[in-house]
Image (cartoon, helix red, strand yellow):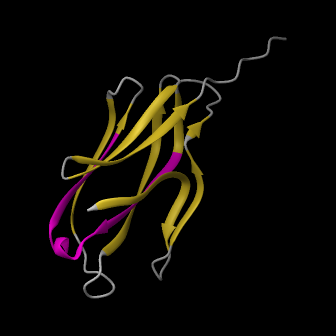
Amino acid sequence: MNVTLAVMADYANLSQDGKLNILGIFNEIKPPQLPFALPTMFLVISFNASPAEVGSNKTIEVKLLDDEARPMLGIEQSLVVPEPSRTGSSTEFNTIIGLNGVRFEHPGHYQFSVLVGGEEKRALSLLVSEPPAKKEM
């Protein structure tokens, strides 16, 4: 199983007819001060699995690492690879993970790693910028 798309966004959902809607894709946060808790963000991941994988169990892990590769957050989910929409073709499906209040203590390069069965399939870089300097009066 492979990851065909992975992005961070302000908002994402799946429509009733299965369309993936993504709003405000980003890879940098410009906090007003640090530490900073990002109110809401969505991690959107699209998967592609071969016909041979249909019905098999997969463990999906998402890890957020700080700028020194220390884990800050970990999410693990088991799923069964669904049937494809067309018989004999590969299966494509999406996962949307909503995250609230993720706290960043300092500026730097952070990373979301997406693993399938313990193997990293995609890494997303997230830059947390230095807050703007306060103006003195």
Image x and y of residue 72, in percent: 35, 33
**Foreground residue, 33 or 111?**
111
Q: Position of residue 129 (x, y in %)?
A: 59, 28
The percent position of residue 39, horizontal first and vertical second, equals 54, 43
Q: Quadrant of the N terminus?
A: bottom left
Farthest residue, direction left: 56
> How many numbered discs, if any?
0
Residue occupying the point 48% across, 52% down: 7
Question: Image quarter for residue 34?
Answer: top right
Q: Is residue 132 above or below residue 19?
A: above
In the image, 3: left or right of 132? left
Which residue appears farthest toward the right when viewing the image? 137
Q: Residue at x 48, y 29 (%)?
A: 109
Judge from the rendering whether residue 33 lies leftward or rightward of residue 127; answer left or right: right
Residue in view at x 14 percent, y 69 percent: 56
Main secondary structure type of the part rendered in magenta? strand
121 up-or-down from 83: above or below: above
Question: Quadrant location of residue 133?
Answer: top right
For the point 19% across and 75% down, which residue is it? 54
Relative horizontal placement of residue 121, taking residue 20 as reference (left or right): left
Q: Which residues are magenta?
A: 40-63
**In the drawing, does residue 89 fall left or right of residue 42?**
left
Q: Position of residue 4 (x, y in %)?
A: 40, 61
Is 107 drawn above or below residue 126 in the view shown?
above
Q: Is residue 62 magenta?
A: yes
Question: Of residues 63 and 16, which is closer to you in this image?
Answer: 63
**128, 101: nearer the viewer:** 128
Verify whether residue 19 appears in magenta. no
